[in-house]
């Protein structure tokens, strides 16, 4: 068969592009070649070593041979290389081999290796390797020999070889591993020494892989966990770690790197009995020459006892630091080394730094009435302890009552090493004792009777006020001579004592009025408050009762109730519409006359603070006077010119449109604040009066414009006008039901009607010509003078003032107002009597 080099090249190129290999059929199809031709070409390439063939079942797969030219391998290889043919004759050798064994190339080439007597290379061993193809795949075989008194180690690898001419042979590759083996030997020795050291250590020593599984543990660990090494190796290092500490330990180990290769931590573990113990570990990360993490090594020790000691010390320190007692420590020469917060608070010191290192005498104050610091130190050094009361006076002058205990602190041998002071703040106790003493004195001297019974209802305390009810001077006398009498009275009270007891049992307290029939049949009334005192478990400790004698108050209340009812009746039947507000501006009185004029029933407004809707009859002509009663005079005059203030009252006269012959109603109004005995405002009253008839009569009494200058004593035509006016007045008086008196400009009485004389219980002869100031209450004289000064000025002002008129024992209320002519000229004064009304102070 004539070889076609071009087809061989194509086959090799195709195989190169398919490193996994192709079958004969694959190559035939891809290159469009005859299958038999491809098989022949592949056989030639296989013989020459240019391709390799692998069998997969019955299928032959061909791939391009990955071979290096032997000449190149010999030249550049660092190993010792020897090439043999199938008859084990040496056909080539590299320089490294010759140099290592100190041989010449000529002495080796062509000779059988078994006869070459190369040191350490046994023909028997080579024969076994070269004849047993299965052992060639075992990897390197190690051989050792001695040369020049030194032991050498070579790692031998036998590689089947195909030469360029297609012949076969073997390549023997020797690697000098003497140095690594020497290192390994030294390492074994060192490891043995290290292991001996590790095993002899009392510390817990282990090594573990990055997957946290043990690779080594020493005997100390085995003894600690009571397990064999074989049971521990390969287990997870966290298996013994307390569950809540595992994440912290793992995070600690994973944080190790080249910059921080070791780190210490504390962890809790469970011992074989299930008890929690404390360990301290120092873990170190071990890296290889490439910087890769190889393993970890840990060294630990049990610190349970130390941890418990630290915890106990911490608890004691916290107890001292947080103690309510002031605790301080000092050296034997008196220098302060420690003080807790309570100590600093007692002495009024801001911080420990302010006294640290200072002598304890600096805490003393010469004003202290008790023993000084030197006195305490003297007793302490002589006897080892001092106890007593100390009054601490701070720098700001404040005082703290304390109980002080000073001790010497001694070591195990009894030698003093320091001083300790403990201060108990007794200030609250001292103040409480004072307060208790004051309260006891107050209870003892209280005007209300106070008694205390124990849980068995035995009287154990009664103050003087209670004892005096029974005429006893002391509790002992009460128990000896009056206790039976007390229980006899108690059984006849209203409500019965048994009912009070039931209420006490159900609710723990009772308060109410108690009617008591005293010896001799006299009834007395008490306001009683009874309470059961119980402990935290609900057990009764004692019972307490407070008695306030309200017998006199009941009499007064009854009298007040009667008076109140009479006043209510008086207001109810007053002819003038009237209502009263209390201090909360709620309606407490609304009489029938006001119901008539407003159309609003008293039941609709009593108790309410919304009453404005009832005054629609005013038609918006004026405000409700009680709503503006507290306005200052200047603001009142500015906002409401038609309203005038005299004293505490305000007055208004206004025309209400509608009815009364369609001219409207002249409605007079007055509002006055109500005061208690101490002068405090407790309410207000407002009254209305229909002045239409009076206004008409008043207009009739006024002179006509042509007699504008009329005054008493005028002559001629003026006297005729006066007589005509007086005639009109007499007619008007006959129609008035109120008592009316007419005064001249100097307030002298000139004319009175019959109702006025009836109220005054007098006659015209007595009254005519008398000055009004002589016929009114002396306390009203300043008000009358103020009125006369104001009304004496010409103008349109028309003030109305309420006064009390009559003899001292028969006073009645009246109102005085000016009579003016055209242009506002004052002609005289008019006095009109009004019904008397008052308001109760039970607001």
Image: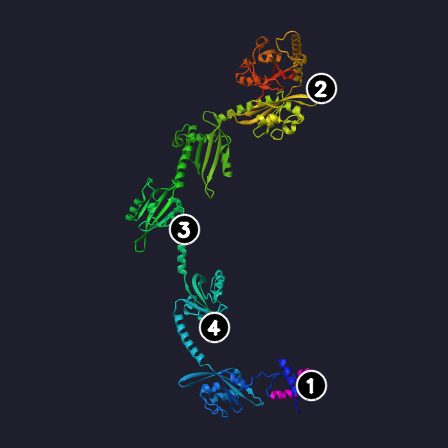
- Work out how far the residue at label 2 is from the one at label 1, CA to CA, in angstroms: 147 Å
- Residue 178 sits in quarter: bottom left
Any mark on residue 661, and which? Answer: 2
Please provide percent x and percent y for residue 696: 67, 16
- CA–CA distance in space, label 2 to label 3: 98 Å
Instruction: Please indicate, yes or no, whether residue 756 appears anywhere in the rendered image.
Output: yes
Assess whether residue 29 is covered by the magenta stretch: yes
Residue pictured at 61% horizontal, 8% vertical: 713
Distance from disc 1 to disc 4, alpha carbons, whole Å, reads 56 Å
Q: Which residue is mark 3?
A: 319
Q: Magenta segment: does it hold 674?
A: no
Front position in the image: 480 or 346? 346
Determine the CA span between mark 4 and mark 2. Answer: 130 Å
Q: Earlier in the sequence, mark 3 or mark 1?
A: 1
Badge 3 element:
helix
Q: Nearer the viewer, residue 74 or 840?
A: 74
Which one is closest to the eye, mark 3 or mark 1? 1
The span from disc 3 to disc 1 (Cα, nearest Å) is 101 Å
Q: Quadrant of the N terminus?
A: bottom right
- The local crowd at label 4, few if under 14, some if 14 to 19, many if 20 or more residues have their Cα within 10 Å, is few
Report the coloring of the rendering: rainbow
Magenta-highlighted residues: 24-47
């Amino acid at each position: 068969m004539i070889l076609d080099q071009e087809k061989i090249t194509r086959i090799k190129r195709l195989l190169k592009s398919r490193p996994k290999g192709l079958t004969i059929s694959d190559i035939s199809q891809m290159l469009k070649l005859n299958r038999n031709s491809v098989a022949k070409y592949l056989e030639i390439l296989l013989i020459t070593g240019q391709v390799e063939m692998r069998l997969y079942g019955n299928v032959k797969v061909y791939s391009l041979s990955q071979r290096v030219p032997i000449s190149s391998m010999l030249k550049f290889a660092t190993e010792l290389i020897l090439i043999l043919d199938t008859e084990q004759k040496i056909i080539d050798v590299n320089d490294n081999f010759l140099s290592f064994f100190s041989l010449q190339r000529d002495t080796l080439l062509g000779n059988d290796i078994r006869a070459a007597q190369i040191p350490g290379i046994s023909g028997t061993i080579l024969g076994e390797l070269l004849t047993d193809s299965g052992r060639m795949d075992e990897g390197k075989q190690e051989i050792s020999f001695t040369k020049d008194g030194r032991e050498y180690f070579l790692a031998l690898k036998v590689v089947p070889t195909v030469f360029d001419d297609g012949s076969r042979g073997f390549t023997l590759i020797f690697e000098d591993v003497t140095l690594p083996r020497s290192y390994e030997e030294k390492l074994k020795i060192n490891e043995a020494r290290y292991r001996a050291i590790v095993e002899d250590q009392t510390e817990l020593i282990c090594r573990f892989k990055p997957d946290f599984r043990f690779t080594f543990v020493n005997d100390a660990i085995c003894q600690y966990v009571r397990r064999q090494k074989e049971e521990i190796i390969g287990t997870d290092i966290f298996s013994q770690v307390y569950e809540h500490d595992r994440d912290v330990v793992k995070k600690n180990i994973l944080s190790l790197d080249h910059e921080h290769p070791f780190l210490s931590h504390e962890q809790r573990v469970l011992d074989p009995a299930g008890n929690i113990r404390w360990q301290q570990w120092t873990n170190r990360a071990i890296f290889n020459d490439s910087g890769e993490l190889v393993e970890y090594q840990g060294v630990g020790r049990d610190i349970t006892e130390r941890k418990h000691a630290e915890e106990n010390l911490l608890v004691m320190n916290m107890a001292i630091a947080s103690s309510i007692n002031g605790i301080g420590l000092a050296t034997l020469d008196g220098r302060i080394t420690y003080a807790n917060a309570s100590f600093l608070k007692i002495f009024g010191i801001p911080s420990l730094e302010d006294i640290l290192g200072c002598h304890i005498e600096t805490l003393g104050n010469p004003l202290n009435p008790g023993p000084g610091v030197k006195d305490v130190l003297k007793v302490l050094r002589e006897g080892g302890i001092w106890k007593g009361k100390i009054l601490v006076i701070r720098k700001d002058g404040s005082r703290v009552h304390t109980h002080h205990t000073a001790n010497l602190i001694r070591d195990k041998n009894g030698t003093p090493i320091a001083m300790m002071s403990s201060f108990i703040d007794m200030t609250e106790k001292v103040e409480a004792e004072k307060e208790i003493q004051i309260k006891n004195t107050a209870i003892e001297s209280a005007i209300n009777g106070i008694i205390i019974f124990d849980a068995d209802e035995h009287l154990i305390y009664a103050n003087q006020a209670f004892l005096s009810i029974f005429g006893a001077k002391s509790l002992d006398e009460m128990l000896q001579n009056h206790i039976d009498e007390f229980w006899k009275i108690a059984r006849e009270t209203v409500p019965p004592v048994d009912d009070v007891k039931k209420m006490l049992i159900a609710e723990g307290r009772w308060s109410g009025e108690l009617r008591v029939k005293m010896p001799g049949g006299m009834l007395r009334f008490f306001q009683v408050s009874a309470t059961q005192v119980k402990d935290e478990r609900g057990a009764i400790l004692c019972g307490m009762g407070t008695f306030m004698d309200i017998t006199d108050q009941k009499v007064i209340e009854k009298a007040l109730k009667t008076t109140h009812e009479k006043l209510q009746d008086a207001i109810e039947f007053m002819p003038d519409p009237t209502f009263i507000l209390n201090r909360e501006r709620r309606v407490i009185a609304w009489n029938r006359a006001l119901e008539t004029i407003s159309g609003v029933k008293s039941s609709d407004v009593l108790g309410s603070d919304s009453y404005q809707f009832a005054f629609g009859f005013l038609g918006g002509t004026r405000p409700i006077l009680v709503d503006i009663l507290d306005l200052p005079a200047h603001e009142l005059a500015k906002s409401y010119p038609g309203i005038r203030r005299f004293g505490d009252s305000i007055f208004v006269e206004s025309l209400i449109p509608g009815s009364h012959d369609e001219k409207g109603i002249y409605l007079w109004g007055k509002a006055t604040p109500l005061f208690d005995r101490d002068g405090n405002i407790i309410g207000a009253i407002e009254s209305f009066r229909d002045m239409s008839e009076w206004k008409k009569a008043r207009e009739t009494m006024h002179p006509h414009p042509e007699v504008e200058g009329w005054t008493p004593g005028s002559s001629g035509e003026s006297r005729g006008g006066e007589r005509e006016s007086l005639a009109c007045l007499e007619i008007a008086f006959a129609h008035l039901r109120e008592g009316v008196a007419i005064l001249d400009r100097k307030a002298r009485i000139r004319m009175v009607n019959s109702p006025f004389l009836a109220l005054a219980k007098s006659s015209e002869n007595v009254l005519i010509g008398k000055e009004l100031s002589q016929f009114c209450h002396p306390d009203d004289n300043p008000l009358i003078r103020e009125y006369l000064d104001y009304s004496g000025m010409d103008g349109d002002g028309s003030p109305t003032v309420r006064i009390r008129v009559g003899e001292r024992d028969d006073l009645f209320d009246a109102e005085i107002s000016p009579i003016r002519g055209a242009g506002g000229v004052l002609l005289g004064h008019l006095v009109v009597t009004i019904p008397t009304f008052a308001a109760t102070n039970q607001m």
